[in-house]
Structure formats: structure tokens, C-alpha cells
Image: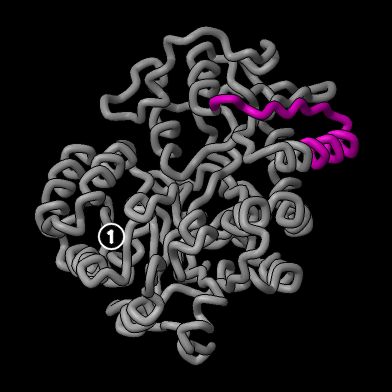
Amino acid sequence: MKRTRALLAAGATSVLLLTACGGSGFDDQGSGGGQQTSGPAKLQVLIGSSGQAETNAVTQAADAWAKSAGDSVTVTAASDLNQQLAQGFASSNPPDVFYVGSDTVASYASNGSLLAYGDELKDKDDFYPNLRDAFTVDGEFYCAPKDFSTLALVIDEKAWQAAGLTDADVPTTWDQLASVAQRLTTGGRTGLVTSSEFQRLGVFAAQAGGSLVTDGKATASSAQMVQGLTYVKSLLANGSMKFAADVGAGDGTEALGTGKAAMTIEGNWIVGGVASSYPDLQYKVVKLPAGPAGPATFTYTNCWGIAADSKNQAAAKQLVEAMTSSDQQLTFAKAFGVMPSVQSAADGFRQQFPAQAAFIDSAADAQALPNEAGVSDVITDLNSKLEGLGTGDPQQILDATQQNLEAALK
């Protein structure tokens, strides 16, 4: 792909437009020029950490690799990952290795900031195919998926039992979900509560066979997309589903933890949130029900990006291979609650975390949000419209999104 870092394409994500900012904070070893061919490599790694547990785990793993390789690694937890990356790219002095979200990979790839190294990894076929797709741009597999999350249905077990429901009632279809949501709605508790953003509601569009983008073309206003949002609207209309803001909660986790919801749709990050804020909540996790087109859920993931300007690309790739090995990813899973991005670790994850099996069992049905440049901004606009879905027209909402997507994908 032609490198055009100095001329950012119109419509690229805003994070890349911060290139006028100052220095990156990294030393000059990695800037410009050819590859280092002798002596120990000094790698700089920038991570968007979820907290001290992740920072400590990544640092320990990097230190262990550096010791065995005879190199050195400095891991830095970013205060603002996108801004710090933009500064590093603008000054031609980026970190060697860094986190990249699936929603920004196309933007970084299009301006030549990223090294496309995924196909060079010896275990590239061990990554889940949908995760490889999330980091593939114009046919090039750019970077190794770091880990991933999926959405599943999370149920308050006490509310479930109080409604007279059993394991046999776990919903596997839309009709069954509507039925149990109605039975679970009582007093101040709503059957199903989620945030109103497409990152949650979009699973129903996917279960109807819809997608915002299909083969690079906008398909937001397809009949399948409309069918998915129309189903959501029907639940909102009968009161068995509400948005988190409408019950005074910040998100589905809070709604479930405070007893305002009997069910929510969340990813495996809910495990840590419940443990820290609602330790007495008894809950179970099951796969989302299938829609008219079959089962589907969303996946969220980051990759280990390597800078095209890094002088230590060979060492960086070795570090990434160590970080994405099956054993190391299971260590990360235990340390800070992520799911391994390699299929060879799936059984180990189920054995260590049986209560979270539904999350990893959903991997085969999971879809990433479209990674084309500009789509994330369109989704942000869509989310503002979805707040009014209860009284709005799904077709009109999606027609507007279709126009925005068509403009973004030109």
C-alpha cells in the first residue's frame, strides 16, 4: 500500500488528525532509516491499558521475552493512546509496538503508519478467522489480534428463579427472548436492559442477516437491518426492554447489578465489573438467541500493531509472537480477564473459566464492526439516532445511516 502519511485522507478518523501535536515522548532509536542489523534491540511498547493488572501482566511478559532474547523492552501505559500514537507518527518517532483497535486499523494502514506483518507469523492460522478479518485491509493481514471479547446474554439468576424459569427456558430464538423478557418484567425491574448504541442493538440486525457494510458497500438500509431494529422496537414498545439511561443506569452492568434489569447484553468485561461493584450478584452467561438468519453476536478486539517506521521490526514480530502464544494468552486471561485470540487456547479457557464458556463459545458466530475508514464516525451518528428508537422509525434511521456510509466509503 502506498505510503501517504503526510497527506491524510479526508474522512480518516479524528485520532489521525492530531498530527500537529508535539513530540511522542519516545527516544529516537526507532525513527526513520533502515533496520537495525546488530546489537540488542530496544523496543518501545505503548498499550491502552484497562488498569494496573493489565499493565503489570504485559510488562512481566515483555520483560521475560526480553531476557530470553537478549533485547530490552519498555512498556508504557498510554494516558491517551490515540493521541500519543498520532504524535509519534507525526514526528516519525512512533513506538515500535502498540495496541490498535479494529475500528482504526484501516485509517492507520491507509496512511502508511502500520507494518503489514500478519501473514509472516508462524501461527497465523491459529487466530480466529473473524479476528484476522477484522485486521485485514485491502487483502493484507496487518497485525496479530491481541485478544477479544464477545457479547452474550447475562441473566440475574435470582430474578430468573423468582419468575419460575429454569434452564429449559433459556431463550434460543427471538420469540423465546421476548417471552422471558416479559415474564421477568415486574415492579421496578425490566426484563432486558442494554445501552442504546449500535454496539449492542446491532446484534439483532446481524441475527436477521444484516450488516452496515457488505463487500465494501453500504447496506445499512437493507431489509435485514430494518428487521433487526424493528424487533428491538417491539420489545421497547411493550415495556419488556428499556435502555440503560431510561432506568437511571450508566450501562447494562449497572442495571443488572442494581436490580433494575433481569437480563442484559454485555461482553466478558462484565465479569470484572460485577466482581468489583456487585459481588453479591448471582448471574449466569448464555449465548444470545438466534434470529431469522441464525446465531450472531459482535466481537471487539485490538491487535498488536508494529510501526512501519520501527528500526526493530524483526524483534517486534518476535515479541508479538511471544505475546500471542497460547500459554501467554491464558496467563493474560487469568491476570486481567480477556479471552485468547488463538483457537488453540479455547479449551484451556473453558477449563479455567467455565462460567464464561458462553462468551468464547460465541466466537464462531461473532462479527466485528466494519473496519473501513470513516465508518466509526458514521456509527457515532447512528448511536445518537438510536436513542430515539422507541418512538422513531427504524427505516428512516437506517436510511440516514445509509447516506452517511455511502459518503464515507467513496
Picture coordinates of residue 7, whole percent (x, y): 34, 17
Q: Quadrant of the N terminus?
A: top left
Q: Is residue 123 magenta?
A: no
Q: Which residues are magenta?
A: 59-80
For the point 33% across and 56% down, the residue is 243
| Quadrant in which residue 297 is drawn | bottom left
Element carrying mark 1: loop
Q: Nearer the viewer, residue 66 or 260?
A: 260
Residue 62 in magenta?
A: yes
Residue 341 placement, left or right of 352: left
Q: Measuring 11% from the left and 58% from the top, which residue is drawn there? A: 393
Is residue 260 at least partly visible in the picture? Answer: yes
Percent position of residue 170, x then y: 47, 84
- Which residue: 57% across, 41% down? 117
For the residue marked with disc 1, what is the amino acid?
Ser
CA neighbours of label 1 inside 10 A, class few (<14), some (14 to 19), many (20+): many
Residue drawn where x is 54% and y is 21% of the image: 84
Left/right of residue 101 with respect to residue 406 in the rendered view: right
Label 1 sits on residue: 211
Q: Quadrant of residue 18?
A: top left
